[in-house]
Amino acid sequence: MESVSQSALLNKSVRQQYMSLPQGQQCQVTYIWIDGSGEGLRNKTRTLDEEPKSIEDIPEWNYDGSSTDQAEGSNSDMYLIPVKMFRDPFTLDPNKLVLCEVLNCDRIPAKTNLRTSCKAVMDVVKEHCLWFGMEQEYTLLGINGHPFSWPPNGYPEPQGLYYCGLGAEHAYGRDIVECHYKACLYAGVKICGTNAEVMPSQWEFQVGPCEGIEMGDHLWVARFLLHRVCEDFGVTATMDPKPVEDWNGAGCHTNISSNQMRDEGGLQYINQAIEKLRIKHKEHIVVYDPHGGEDNKRRLTGLHETSNIQNFSAGVADRSASIRIPRQVDQDKKGYFEDRRPAANCNPYAVTEAITKTCFLDSEEN
């Protein structure tokens, strides 16, 4: 089986000849949305007569929901509601990417449109100035499903050499990582870093700090950009939480702080939030992957720098705990905490909504 797609082998200099043609005042706008799987992204593009100056200048659109597992063929139209605009790093200025919410024929949010309820919660707690940062781990695969650059039969050297690794024998696919980073910066995504992870061909990028609803918006667009960059290189990126048994899995560690937590003496509010999360551990596990915790069962085993899915734990600088308080935060007595339970394929709207409701809406203390 092939490891690289045939599309990646097309003559890119010929493509560049056409991409450099002027397009006048017109603007290409690519609409992006989450499909019926709750994990997949879809997109399509239209021409506007001029460059949109804000999200209000981008019209609603529609698509065939029966082809994305979101509607029946007899009543298939779904509405695309633009919510966030970014620059397009693939076709360049003045062209745009626009993230959309999905509504059904009755203009009710689609089942996989979790943004609507998340935004409602974020609006209620706006005075807390909640900052989120999410650390998105992913694994590069060939189109044959085999980890990128792994031996065709067998395994590379045991993990230990690859985390933040350097050199061709340790870092697999850095070109993709660096192109994705640049694409995010160009687009306006709040990417703040990247590194090679513990398993070879596994990488991580971080998005944040983002306030409220923008966390989900920016992470979903960062994921779109990753898949689109991988397409150009002829490989794929998977968010599967455990792509290879007996190797480190992939999470989406989520960092949280409020204005009280960031102020002097904020550690007491961090500890209060952790205790609330302890009480709601099982409820959170259900929403921390798209399949009600079934994906995370393969990853949260208590091994490979994870907590056990059955038990809640918290500790300072403890990467085997459910919740980690960074050592610097413990020393400063203020800052943020990290929820290490969300899976790599989590929906960031679901995760940030659940954390917000548990820590800031379940009592009047905060």
Image (spheres, helix red, strand yellow):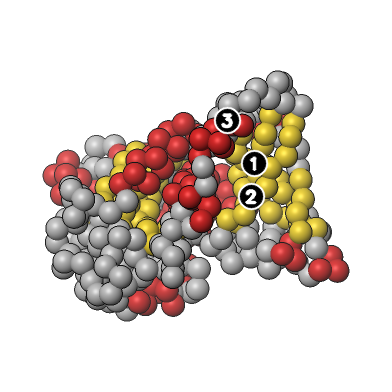
* Residue kind at label 1, given as amino acid type: Thr
Q: Position of residue 250 (x, y in %)?
A: 33, 63
Up/down of 95 relative to 24, above or below: below
- 110 left or right, relative to 310: right
Quarter of the picture containing the N terminus is: bottom left
**Secondary structure type for disc 2:** strand
Q: Position of residue 72 (x, y in %)?
A: 79, 70
- 314 left or right, relative to 16: left
**Secondary structure type for disc 3:** helix
Count up the numbered dots: 3
Q: Position of residue 196 (x, y in %)?
A: 26, 51
The residue identified by callout 2 is: 43
Front-lying residue, 142 or 70: 142
User: Is there CB contact under 8 Å for labels 3 and 1?
Assistant: no
Q: Residue at x 60, y 38 (%)?
A: 97
Which quadrant of the structure image shows residue 283? Answer: bottom left
The residue identified by callout 3 is: 17
- 97 left or right, relative to 147: right
Task: Tell me the number on the disc at residue 30.
Answer: 1
**Secondary structure type for disc 1:** strand
Mark 3 or mark 1: whose residue is earlier in sequence: 3
